[in-house]
Image (cartoon, rainbow, N blue to C red):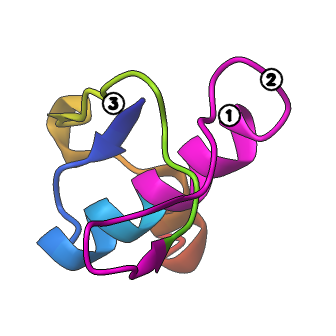
Amino acid sequence: MVVREDLAVWQKLNVTAFLASAVAGGAEDVIGEPYADGSGNAYLAMFRQPVLIYSARCPHGYYPEARSANPG
Protein backbone atom coordinates (compact mmCIF):
# COMPACT_ATOMS: atom_id res chain seq x y z
CA MET A 1 0.00 0.00 0.00
CA VAL A 2 1.14 3.51 -0.67
CA VAL A 3 0.00 6.30 1.66
CA ARG A 4 0.30 10.05 1.21
CA GLU A 5 3.20 11.57 3.08
CA ASP A 6 1.36 14.73 4.16
CA LEU A 7 -0.97 12.86 6.55
CA ALA A 8 -0.35 12.77 10.30
CA VAL A 9 1.25 9.54 11.52
CA TRP A 10 -1.96 8.37 13.21
CA GLN A 11 -3.86 8.98 9.95
CA LYS A 12 -1.35 6.95 7.94
CA LEU A 13 -1.65 4.01 10.31
CA ASN A 14 -5.45 4.28 10.51
CA VAL A 15 -5.88 4.38 6.73
CA THR A 16 -3.43 1.54 6.22
CA ALA A 17 -5.05 -0.71 8.82
CA PHE A 18 -8.53 -0.02 7.46
CA LEU A 19 -7.62 -0.72 3.83
CA ALA A 20 -5.44 -3.72 4.61
CA SER A 21 -8.16 -5.35 6.70
CA ALA A 22 -10.69 -4.87 3.91
CA VAL A 23 -8.38 -6.48 1.36
CA ALA A 24 -7.25 -9.31 3.64
CA GLY A 25 -10.76 -10.14 4.81
CA GLY A 26 -11.56 -11.54 1.37
CA ALA A 27 -8.84 -14.20 1.42
CA GLU A 28 -9.06 -17.28 3.63
CA ASP A 29 -5.36 -17.95 4.15
CA VAL A 30 -4.31 -14.39 4.99
CA ILE A 31 -5.95 -13.99 8.40
CA GLY A 32 -5.07 -16.32 11.28
CA GLU A 33 -7.33 -17.58 14.05
CA PRO A 34 -8.41 -15.63 17.15
CA TYR A 35 -6.11 -16.47 20.07
CA ALA A 36 -5.52 -16.00 23.80
CA ASP A 37 -2.29 -15.21 25.63
CA GLY A 38 -0.93 -17.05 28.65
CA SER A 39 -3.11 -14.95 30.99
CA GLY A 40 -6.27 -15.83 29.08
CA ASN A 41 -6.70 -12.43 27.38
CA ALA A 42 -8.54 -12.95 24.09
CA TYR A 43 -7.34 -11.29 20.86
CA LEU A 44 -8.87 -11.03 17.41
CA ALA A 45 -7.28 -12.75 14.45
CA MET A 46 -4.32 -10.99 12.86
CA PHE A 47 -2.49 -11.08 9.56
CA ARG A 48 -0.30 -14.12 9.06
CA GLN A 49 2.28 -12.07 7.12
CA PRO A 50 3.78 -8.64 7.87
CA VAL A 51 2.35 -5.54 6.20
CA LEU A 52 4.84 -3.12 4.65
CA ILE A 53 3.94 0.57 4.75
CA TYR A 54 5.57 3.10 2.41
CA SER A 55 5.04 6.82 2.01
CA ALA A 56 5.45 8.90 -1.13
CA ARG A 57 5.17 12.46 -2.32
CA CYS A 58 3.15 13.49 -5.32
CA PRO A 59 5.20 15.39 -7.89
CA HIS A 60 5.08 19.14 -7.29
CA GLY A 61 2.73 18.69 -4.30
CA TYR A 62 -0.21 17.97 -6.60
CA TYR A 63 -3.24 16.25 -5.08
CA PRO A 64 -6.46 16.04 -7.12
CA GLU A 65 -8.74 16.93 -4.17
CA ALA A 66 -6.63 20.02 -3.40
CA ARG A 67 -7.12 21.20 -6.96
CA SER A 68 -10.90 20.77 -6.86
CA ALA A 69 -11.11 22.48 -3.46
CA ASN A 70 -9.09 25.50 -4.68
CA PRO A 71 -10.04 26.13 -8.32
CA GLY A 72 -7.82 28.86 -9.53
Q: Is residue 31 left or right of residue 11?
A: right
**Magenta range:** 16-42
Mark 2 = which residue? 27
Q: Give the numbered dot on residue 24.
A: 1
Give the image quarter of residue 66.
bottom left
Magenta stretch: residue 36 in it?
Answer: yes
- Residue 63 vertical position relative to residue 69 in the rendered view, above or below: above
Residue 6 in percent (x, y) is at: 17, 62
Residue 41 in percent (x, y) is at: 39, 82
- In contact (CB < 8 Å): disc 1 and disc 2: yes
The answer to whether one can see residue 8 in this image is no
Q: Is residue 45 left or right of residue 62?
A: right
Q: Is residue 39 left or right of residue 41?
A: left
| Upstream in sequence: badge 2 or badge 3 | 2
CA distance separating discs 2 and 3: 15 Å
Q: Give the numbered dot on residue 51.
A: 3
The residue positioned 71% from the left and 35% from the top of the image is 23
Residue neighbourhood size for the residue with mark 1, other residues' Cα within 10 Å, grouped as few (<14), some (14–19), many (≥20): some
Q: Give the numbered dot on residue 32.
A: none
